[in-house]
Amino acid sequence: MLLLIKHATIFDPEPQGACDLLIGGGKILLMEPDIRVPRKHCEVVDARNLNAVPGFIDGHVHIMGGGGEGGFATRTPDLPLTDAIYGGVTTVVGCLGTDGYTRNMAGLLAKAKGLDEEGISTFVYSGSYGLPLRTLMPTLEEDLLFIDKVIGAGEVALSDHRSSQPTFEAFAQVVAMARRGGMLSGKAGVVNVHLGDGARGLEFLRRILAETELSAAQMLPTHINRNPRLFEEGIAYAKGGGNVDFTTSTLPSYLEDGEIPCAKALRRMLDAGVDPGRITFTSDGQGSLPDWDRHGRLQEISVGRVTSLFPAVRQAVQEEGIPLETALRVITSNPARILKLKAKGRLAPGMDADLVLLDPKDLEVRTVIAKGRMLMKAGRLLAKGMFQ
Ligand code: ZN
C-alpha cells in the first residue's frame, strides 16, 4: 500500500515550500507538487497547514536501560516504543553507560533488533563507560565490520568519577580502532564520549587532535551543556572543527547547579560563531539522572526520556528565536551526517520514509511515520510495543 501526503509544507530540514510526498516500500518515492495516484492504491493524508520534517534522530539512548548507580533497585527500565513515537523519534542509537556488566552488548543488540521489529530504526555503540572496551566480537573493528547496527564505540566516560580513569594512550587507541573499523566497514566509526564534571574536561579530545593523526570526525563528546566551564570548552572545541552534543534530559537541580538548557546552549553557540552543522542534541533517554551531594552521596535518581528531545528544539524556536530549519538540524541532518546514517535525517526521494508532521502554530508533533508506516496519526497512537 502506498502512502500519499498531500499539501505538506516541507522542511527537509531546509524550507522547500508546499509539496506532496509519495511513500512506498519504506522509502520516499517522490517529493513534488500535485502527485496523483489512484485512490484504491494508496492511503491519503491531508497535510494542508502542517509542516513535514524528517523523523527525529536520537543519537544517545540507553534503550535497554542503564543506571544502577545507587544499587540494583536503581537500574532504569528499557525504552518503551510509545515514548519514541510520542517524541517523534524514528531513529535511536542505543548505548550502555556506567553498567556494562549486568547490561551487555548481546542484550543491547537484542533490544535494538526488537525496537526495529516494532517499527523504528536502531543503531548501537559498542562498549560502555569503561576501557578496555567490552565488545561483542573480539575487537571494535570486528564489531563495526560484522554487526550491521554497530556504528561506533561508547559511551566512553572521561573526566568523571564513574569513568575507568583511562590513560590518554588507552583512549587514543579506542579512537584509532573506531577510525580503522569505520573505514573498513564504510561506517562513521565515532566514539561517543561521555564527559563528566571533572576538571580535565575535553583535555583528552584536544590532545587527540594535537598529538595524533586522528581527526575530530572520530569523536562526538556529549553532555557538553552540563556545566558552564565544560560548555565554554565546548565552544572553543566546536570552533576548532569538533562536533558537540547537548543532553536534553535534565532535572531542576542540574539547572540550578549551572547546567545550560539545550535551547539556550544552541543560541549561545550560534552567537559565538559555531557552525550550526557541528551541533547535535540527544536525550540520554532511559539513562539515570542521579543527583549527588557534595560528598558524592546519591540524593535522588530519576530517568531520562526521549520525549525531552524535540521539546528542546521547539524551545529553541519559540524562546530563542532560532529558525525552525536551523533548530531542526540538530536532531535530523546533523546527526545523520556525523554518524553516517545515509538514508536518514533528510526528506528527499530515495531516503527512508521517516517523517513527522508538525502543527506550525504550536510545533506539536501530530503524525509520525517511520519506515513508511504510520505510528501516530493526528495525535492518535497507532502502534505500541509488544508488551505495552
Ligand atoms: Zn553519559
Image (tube, rainbow, N blue to C red):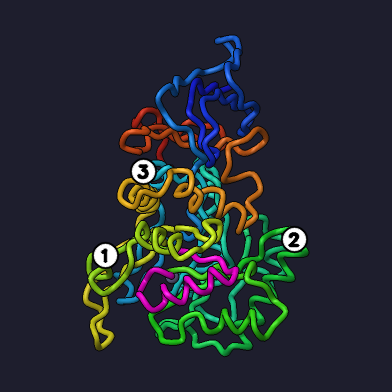
Mark 2: amino acid: Ser
Identify which residue is drawn at 36% across, 43% down: 388
Q: Can residue 66 be seen by looking at this rendering?
A: yes
Please provide the residue range marked out in magenta. 224-245
Quadrant assignment for ligand 1? bottom left
Residue 156: x and y, percent?
52, 75
Would you say the beta carbon of the disc 1 residue lies within 8 angstroms of ligand 1? no
Which residue carries the number 2 mark?
Answer: 185
Does dot 3 land on a helix, a strand or a loop?
loop
Whichever of callouts 3 and 1 sits on the residue coming sooner in the sequence is 1
Would residue 199 be found to the left or right of residue 141 on screen? left
Which residue carries the number 1 mark?
Answer: 251
Residue 141: x and y, percent?
71, 70
Identify which residue is drawn at 66% across, 81% down: 173
Mark 3: amino acid: Gln
Does dot 1 land on a helix, a strand or a loop?
loop
